[in-house]
Image (cartoon, rainbow, N blue to C red):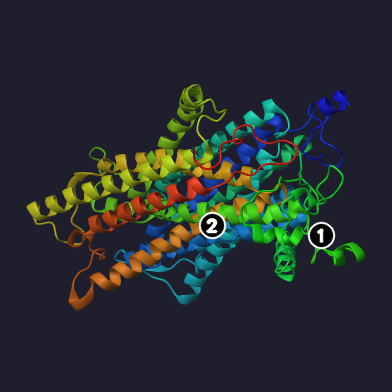
Amino acid sequence: MREVADMYTQDGTVDMKGNPATKKNTGNWRACPYILANECCERLAYYGMSTNLVNYMKTRLGQESAMAANNVTNWSGTCYITPLIGAFLADAYLGRFWTIASFMIIYILGLSLLTMASSVKGLVPSCDGGTCHPTESQTAVVFLSLYLIALGTGGIKPCVSSFGADQFDENDDGERRSKSSFFNWFYFSINIGALVASSVLVYVQTHVGWGWGFGIPAVVMAVAVVSFFVGTPLYRHQRPGGSPITRIAQVIVASARKCRVAVPEDVSRLHETADKESGIEGSRKLEHTRQFGCLDKAAVVTPEDESERKSPWRLCTVTQVEELKSVVRLLPIWASGIVFATVYSQMSTMFVLQGNTLDASMGPHFSIPAASLSIFDTLSVIVWVPVYDRLIVPAARAVTGRPRGFTQLQRMGIGLVVSVFSMLTAGILDVIRLRAIARHGLYGEKDIVPISIFWQVPQYFIIGAAEVFTFVGQLEFFYDQAPDAMRSMCSALALTTVALGNYLSTLLVTIVTHITTRNGRVGWIPDNLNRGHLDYFFWLLAVLSLINFAVYLVIAGWYTYKKTADFPDDDKVGHDGAN
């Protein structure tokens, strides 16, 4: 038996043919280069198309600053809502591998259409004197291509990180430690792609043309597809476990039917399968927890249940109930990430608009596009990931005794604090910018403020540091704390914080613009930012971030980590909450 355990994975993963996955020939780090290369290329394509999108909206589609910023954040938000669709299909029916493969086709169709919209005569708007005049049909083609891309990324983004983590057996100590490191390097690969996008591709879009600028991402996405399929023989697969929505509905209905039934003090009397398997395909059994006791009624065995054929709409297992509890516990943590995502979204909107007013020259013959400064966020992540993985974690481990150094909740909390300083830095720069404008009388819309655009670098660099703590922490936390058969769904849930952060940014801009332009006033965010007060918007986000962190501390102290019945994680046992 010991030899069999050493030969095969113990977490239920299978190979491409559906046989138990062997440790020697599948998974672990040997499968990860293909997954990481796929993610790197896919993110290069995404950021190569999206980083400079706000300027495309302004120059080619003739939109005003506020409208362009809102259209970008709305589209970007949709890119992080559609993962719920892909995640559901992956967990319920297709599995992560085939979901990724299928949605890649939609993604490439969207990129190809966007390339055509920016290069094919008749689809490209006519321009004169630096002003473009798109027709409704030309604008419609652009938005159709963008939302095809949003749908395509919806099947890829929630599944790739989870599919990569599936390559490590949680029941193997060495592989389990490697899985934690995998999330760091996964985010590292994302930012390698973003680095090329925000430097080379933004330059191509600005100085060569939008056709080339959008065509290159389409080609790179094709490379991502090839990379993914090359690793097929090495992958481990988690079997889809059926509709998680149905299982959740069954718990709710069963507990409602038994609302008058008392839960026994002895939880061993609650219904659970007798054998080692949980009864849910691809899922281990979960230990009972005391929180949300009203849901335990769904697992109470009544005389009617004993005398009749057991219906899942009347009697659920403890594991099924704990699945729902796990998701409910994740929701407050999920909500606390929305404000952080709002701060993050400023890099593609307000930071770019602020940079457009600054001196972007690098010598007498070259100027850097404002959107390219996001390269410093990327460089920050590339620096911080190995620093965190190789220096901070070992140092923290020596102090705390935890394998990960920090608990996942502590890691995310540190990132929330760091993000506040990025808004403070951006606000301080804008105060300096406005003083320079007043000093030199630069109130014209095209007047360039004599402050180097590279003074924006600190605000980008700080956000990059915050990402390594919060976004990477979220990737690991939502995968780790999700029920086994709902990991894609919970990864998608984490991604929706980015969507809602973008939508919140849109809402804040809309409200701020409406309130601050009353009675004929210019407002905080006018088209001519030299007459506005962008610093006030950054102060507002800093205050919201501080309030959000205070709420997060309360939530983290309340949270109870998930425990599987067969293999509790030694990083969590005895460490509920953020302690």
Q: Residues within 10 Å of mark 1 (few under 14, many from 20)?
A: many
CB atoms at circles 2 and 1 under 8 Å apart?
A: no
Question: Which badge, 2 or 1, is on the more N-terminal residue?
Answer: 1
Q: Is residue 499 visible?
A: yes
Q: How many numbered markers are drawn?
A: 2
**Residue type at numbered disc 1:** Val
- Residue beneath label 1, please? 301
Q: Secondary structure at mark 1?
A: loop
Mark number for residue 496? 2
Residue 337 shown left or right of residue 404 in the figure: left
Q: At 57% across and 43% down in the image, what residue appears? A: 477
Give the residue type that dot 2 points to.
Thr
Q: Residue at x 65, y 57 (%)?
A: 293
Q: Residue at horizontal 78%, vertical 48%?
A: 268
Which quadrant of the view contains residue 460? top left
Disc 2 and disc 1: Cα gap in Å? 37 Å
